[in-house]
Amino acid sequence: MNSAYNAARQMRPDAQTFAWSWQNDTYSIAYDVQGSGAPVLLLPAFSTVSSRAEMQGLAERLSSQFQVVTLDWLGFGQSSRPALDYSPALYRQLLQDFVAAVFDQPVAVVAAGHSAGYALQAAQVLQWSSLVLVAPTWRGPLTTMGAPVSIAGGIRQLVRSPLLGQALYALNTTPSFLKWMYGRHVYTDVERLTPDFIHKKHAITQQPGARFASAAFVTGALDPATQRDELLNWAHGISVPLLVIVADQAPPKSKAEMEALANVPGMQVERLPGTLGLHEEYAAEVAAVVGPFLSQMSQ
């Protein structure tokens, strides 16, 4: 095992695991539980470096009032990373099964990025007590760039292939590329992109099997919706309290989607500095908004 892989394994050595069965196989889903009180589920954003560690700053602040549960999606973080055809159906079922296994009462959800779409759709079948969408998105990078489905699918299969796929994935997860990506789309303060920060993000990408779910996300295969109206219809159909946090410095196309959700009748709206990594970079500011919202809703 290389040093980056070992570093990734040491991020949260006290993780609990949920054994999840999917298509006759069982996989390990890593999650943490902190604090006590009304339950809150934190869902990290999908990305090449997706990990529940990105929610840690928010989890620590909320755990003084709530029981906070944070998971790693299958294929990311410290959860199993099998060579599956990752799809929205897989993650929808995982979310339903995880909630049924871990919680015995309605749970509040704080979902970042693409997770927002999954949480919105799940609200049609699960009993959320309230729902917070932080810098919500629903289109992966290639989808946002307008890549045709056939080309995106071809790239996905190429990255999944042995040797060449591994080489392409390695080129797109170098520390220098990750720093560039963070500075362009994810963080607003480049001073926070220290060598140690980038090393930890790079470690996440180096676990065996890391490229499969990542390739699915980048090429749009994990987009929870196929068009904006689907997302808005899910939001319209929810009866529990809803809060959307718009990232003021988000890329224009992503921010337009956040603003569309902000315009749903009955939606509570907050705007904070930050971009797609708002939930991590500005955890204190997010917690200052989310904490009172959840406290009010749990009374």
Image (tube, rainbow, N blue to C red):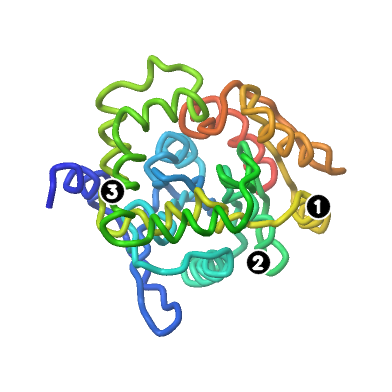
Labels in figure, total: 3
- Contact between marks 1 and 2 (CB within 8 A): the answer is no
Horizontal side of 218 relative to 232 (left or right) equals left
Distance between the alpha carbons at the discs numbered 1 and 3 = 38 Å
Separation of residues labelled 1 and 2 (CA atoms): 21 Å
Marks 2, 3: nearer the viewer: 3
The one of 286 and 88 positioned closer to us in this rendering? 88
Mark 3 crowdedness (10 Å alpha carbons): few <14, some 14-19, many ≥20 = few
| Closest to the observer, 291 or 168 | 168
Q: Residue 257 occupies which quadrant of the picture?
A: top right
**Residue that numbered label 1 is attached to:** 229
Marked residue nearer the N-terminal end (2 or 3): 2
Q: Nearer the viewer, mark 1 or mark 2?
A: 1
| Residue where numbered disc 3 is placed | 167
Which mark sits nearer the N-terminus, 1 or 3? Answer: 3
Where on the picture, by quarter, is residue 208?
bottom left
Q: Residues within 10 Å of mark 2 (few under 14, many from 20)?
A: some
The answer to the question of whether label 2 and label 3 lie on touching residues, with beta carbons closer than 8 A, is: no
Look at 44% across and 30% down and name the residue there: 181
Which residue corresponds to the image point at 45% horizontal and 23% vertical from the top-left?
183
Which residue is identified by label 2? 126
Who's the residue at 39% across and 43% down the image?
49
Dot 1 or dot 2, earlier in sequence: 2
Res 112 visible: no
Question: Measured from the top left, where is residue 273 in percent x and y?
Answer: 60, 21
